[in-house]
Amino acid sequence: MQIPEYFSQRHTVRQYSDKEISTQQLNAMLDAASHAPNTGNMQWYSVIVTRDDEQKRRLAPLHFGQPQICDANVVLTFCIDLRRFELWCRKREAEPGFDNFQSFVASMIDTSLVAQQLCTVAEMQGIGTCYLGTTTYKARQIAEVLDLPVRVVPVATVTLGYPSSGKVADGGSWRLPVSAWVHDETYHEPSAADIDSWYASLEADPQSQKFIDENNKKTLAQVFTDVRYPRTSAEQFSKAYLDFIKENGFGTEY
Amino acid sequence: MQIPEYFSQRHTVRQYSDKEISTQQLNAMLDAASHAPNTGNMQWYSVIVTRDDEQKRRLAPLHFGQPQICDANVVLTFCIDLRRFELWCRKREAEPGFDNFQSFVASMIDTSLVAQQLCTVAEMQGIGTCYLGTTTYKARQIAEVLDLPVRVVPVATVTLGYPSSGKVADGGSWRLPVSAWVHDETYHEPSAADIDSWYASLEADPQSQKFIDENNKKTLAQVFTDVRYPRTSAEQFSKAYLDFIKENGFGTEY
């Protein structure tokens, strides 16, 4: 029983051809993806489909100008959505008690699962995908562009398009060995030698040295901590997202 | 270009045969799953593999006695893991700034994506999967059983085993129509008629009437709000998880 090669060979696709993904095809993929598992089958999520060029131009700066927003055929913004389910409850004489952090966590997981299932379905159709991690940084502004009502909060953005290279899978990307992140029965604390060995091939990659040089850093880790994901930005985005989820009724005080 | 039928036909499997999933097979599946997308390729996650009967017996009550913990061949607890990456940073003269809510959100999404990819890989091998939504309810106690150090926080549990029915996909489960959760360009507020129409087939299912009768409720929605996901439990679990993530350095105050 072989695992399809696609899984370990897949990679993010940021450059797309002009070939269109039809609405019919997209909806069939989204329908298939919605059969991903979710909490209590309550489907606490929605997705906003952006095809309109003007909407893409409004979204692009909120994703820090990453070109794939405008270049992609379709942009999908996956959102937590408690609104629809609560409307149903209230129409059925039921009083929802989902305005709390637990519901935020459950819906964030479920939204992530359906997003990932959509990516897998799309890639298996030869369509390239790219997650944008910037969605939670500017959630409030993205919600404005997409006209999201209260109780609907952006979580993840995926751009879709046929790859200009023609390929969604050819060789995969670097990953940690299984021994680094899979633990038998209990957590095994890494030794200094483990850390050296797990990251050795990444650190030896010429691309890593290029990042270090370009950013005038001493180590690859410093590129992550000082340039790509610095504390000051993370704290600013933390506050912005927390404020926004609280305004959407996902309280964090008990 | 057909979407494989598996995606819309799959379903959760809670009853397993005795057929074993070998360590070699499991590791190959986990390795394939790790090629799911993740933020900055930092892989802020770990998974704890439980095969030992005694460990399963310790985990079972923390999942409210759901029988699949003890019945499954393998139990996987997917965890946020900032620890490994931060150890690497500190060994490389880099000062990580990931002790904040933004890093919690990013790692929760990434942990969910790899969990979902593992489920897809497993199901495509004929192995049944079941998510347990109870993991965040009792995260602190689960962390104790699994010896998780600080900065490692349980997010989702998946049980794995060959289905006793022999099937991981035969007919799928009820889902909302795509029109209910997919929005073109902007969010479309549901009308009362939309809500009635989207939930009609679920409400008409004899199983739904059975749940209503068994619980002495008037509507199916009340089964969700009053019995399955009541406010009092959600608030209690919210506080417990928030306290635990804060102790793990994922602050929520700025």
Image: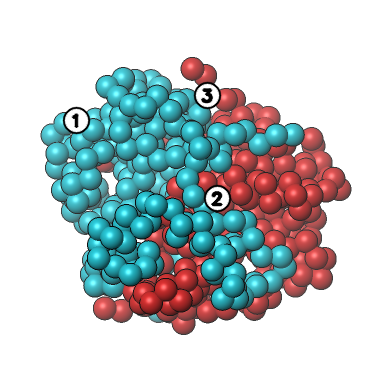
Chain colours: A cyan, B red
Amino acid type at mark 3 = Ile
User: Secondary structure beneath disc 1?
Assistant: loop
Residue at mark 3: B3
Q: Tell me, yes or no, if residue A242 can be seen here.
A: no
Could you say where residue A78 lies in the image, as x and y percent from the top left?
36, 45
Amino acid type at mark 2 = Ser
Chain of the residue on which disc 1 is drawn:
A
Chain of the residue on which disc 2 is drawn:
B
Residue at mark 2: B34
Q: CA distance from mark 1 to mark 2?
A: 34 Å
The N terminus of chain A lies in which quarter of the figure? top right
Residue A52 is labelled as 1
Position of residue B63 in the picture relative to residue A246 (left or right)? right
Q: CA distance from mark 3 to mark 1?
A: 26 Å
The C terminus of chain A lies in which quarter of the figure? bottom left
Q: Are marks 1 and 2 on the same chain?
A: no
